[in-house]
Image (cartoon, helix red, strand yellow):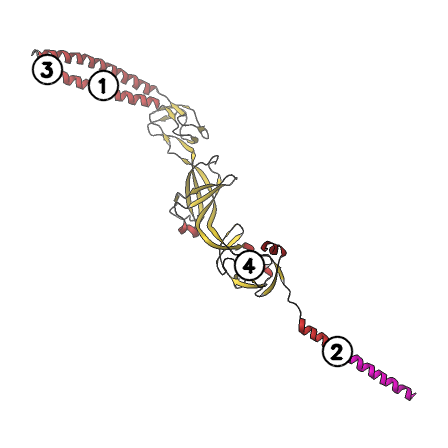
């Protein structure tokens, strides 16, 4: 039995040695393969875009209100009692349309009185002219003295002066009679009526306030921080809040003070009504503070906020290189880059949030097709 066990033991030892040698060989091969090929670094799939150069406008937008430009109050130009209210608050009126009528009894009497006086003077002048002609003939015959003739001529001139004065009073009385019919000086809307039927008014009494529908005054409150950059003449784009076509205008004037409650400065725009704009409506006003013709811009979602600030990732040789940038204005999905990149450089857009400095990237097939 002892002799049989010894050959078996030798066979077991030999097999063990062979197994160990095989394992060592396999381990050596695996080690060589690991040293040659190593684990591959994963690449982040991204889309890219180029840094573009073009014009950008720095703007500020606010919401204001439209007002019809009110004319000075319409006042009575003669005296009398209000006989009839023809147009009231809210009525749309046309130029020269009658707003109210005053009792014209006194004015008609003044016209008749001045007219009668003028007729009487005309008759006296005609008679005096005949006298002057007759005395002129007698003077030529030396039948009267020169002083008699001069006195007759002076009387004629006096009567003529009185007629001119009376005719002026007649014209004034006729004008006062016309003014008993108070008319609108412009097309517009009655904003306020200050008198009622039966009231007695004298010359200068305020009667109506009319707002003209053809002229608009737009007030736009802009934040105090840009007050020093605003000035009359700056371009403003106006957009009705209810929709409609935008209208280009300019700042007409600036209020001299900052609002204590709103901390804003009011820009005033005076324009003709573009058509259908109503007083009291809201309007959006975008003022152009500055235009830069050669600004650099990138897609807005390519700019990433990191602890050190805002960065973009410039793509070079399938690597993302982090660049800190200084940004400017944002417009139409793009953002201005003031410093940090150059025109034509390729930057990461979609997927940029997952990148770090030096990371490997893989560009989307869509972007590759676009580049081709």
For the residues labelled 1 and 3, say whether their Cβ atoms are less than 8 Å apart.
no
Report whether 60 appears left or right of 129. right
Q: Quadrant of the C terminus?
A: bottom right
Comes first in the chain, label 1 or label 3 = 3
Residue closest to the far right: 1
Q: Which residue is mark 3?
A: 148
Marks 1 and 4 sit apart, C-alpha to C-alpha, by 95 Å
Q: Is residue 59 above or below residue 32?
A: above
What distance separates the C-alpha of mark 3 from that of mark 2?
162 Å
Q: Nearer the viewer, residue 78 or 318?
A: 318
Which is in the foreground here, disc 3 or disc 4?
A: 4
* Side of 44 where 24 appears, left or right: right
Front-lying residue, 240 or 293? 293
Q: How many marks?
A: 4
Q: What is the magenta range?
A: 1-26
**Closer to viewer: mark 2 or mark 4:** 2
Residue 162 lies within the magenta run: no
Residue behind mark 4: 347
Find disc 2 in the rendering and name its residue: 25
The CA distance from mark 1 to mark 3 is 23 Å
Q: Which mark is residue 163?
A: 1
Q: Secondary structure at mark 3?
A: helix
């Amino acid at each position: 039995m002892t002799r049989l066990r010894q050959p078996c033991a030798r066979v077991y030892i030999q097999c063990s040695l062979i197994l160990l040698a095989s394992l060592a060989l396999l381990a050596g091969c695996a080690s060589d393969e690991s040293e040659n090929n190593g684990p591959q670094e994963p690449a982040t799939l991204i889309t890219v875009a180029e840094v573009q150069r073009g014009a950008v406008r720095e703007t500020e937008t606010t919401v204001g209100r439209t007002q019809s430009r009110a004319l000075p109050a319409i006042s009575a130009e003669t005296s009398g009692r209000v006989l009839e209210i023809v147009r009231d608050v809210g009525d749309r009126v046309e130029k020269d349309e009658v707003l109210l009528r005053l009792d014209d009894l006194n004015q008609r009497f003044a016209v008749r009185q001045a007219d009668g006086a003028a007729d009487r003077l005309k008759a006296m002048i005609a008679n005096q002219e005949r006298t002057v002609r007759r005395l002129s003939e007698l003077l030529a015959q030396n039948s009267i003295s020169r002083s008699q003739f001069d006195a007759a001529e002076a009387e004629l001139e006096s009567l003529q002066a009185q007629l001119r004065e009376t005719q002026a009073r007649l014209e004034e009385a006729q004008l006062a009679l016309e003014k008993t019919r108070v008319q609108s000086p412009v097309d517009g809307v009655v904003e306020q009526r200050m008198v009622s039927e039966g009231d007695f008014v004298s010359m200068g009494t305020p009667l109506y306030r009319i707002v003209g529908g053809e002229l608009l005054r737009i007030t736009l409150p802009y934040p105090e921080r840009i007050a020093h950059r605003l000035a009359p003449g700056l371009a403003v784009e106006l957009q009705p809040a209810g929709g409609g076509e935008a209208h280009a205008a300019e700042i007409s004037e600036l209020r001299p003070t900052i609002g204590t409650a709103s901390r804003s400065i009011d820009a005033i725009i005076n324009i003709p009504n573009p058509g259908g704009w109503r007083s009291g409506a809201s309007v959006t006003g975008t003022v152009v503070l500055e235009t830069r013709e050669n600004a650099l811009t990138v897609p807005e979602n390519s700019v990433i906020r990191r602890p050190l600030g805002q960065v973009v990732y410039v793509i070079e040789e399938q690597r993302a290189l982090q660049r800190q940038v200084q940004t400017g204005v944002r417009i139409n999905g793009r953002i201005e880059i003031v410093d940090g990149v150059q025109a034509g450089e390729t930057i990461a857009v979609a997927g940029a949030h997952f990148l770090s400095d030096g990371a490997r990237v893989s560009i989307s097939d869509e972007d590759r097709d676009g580049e081709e």
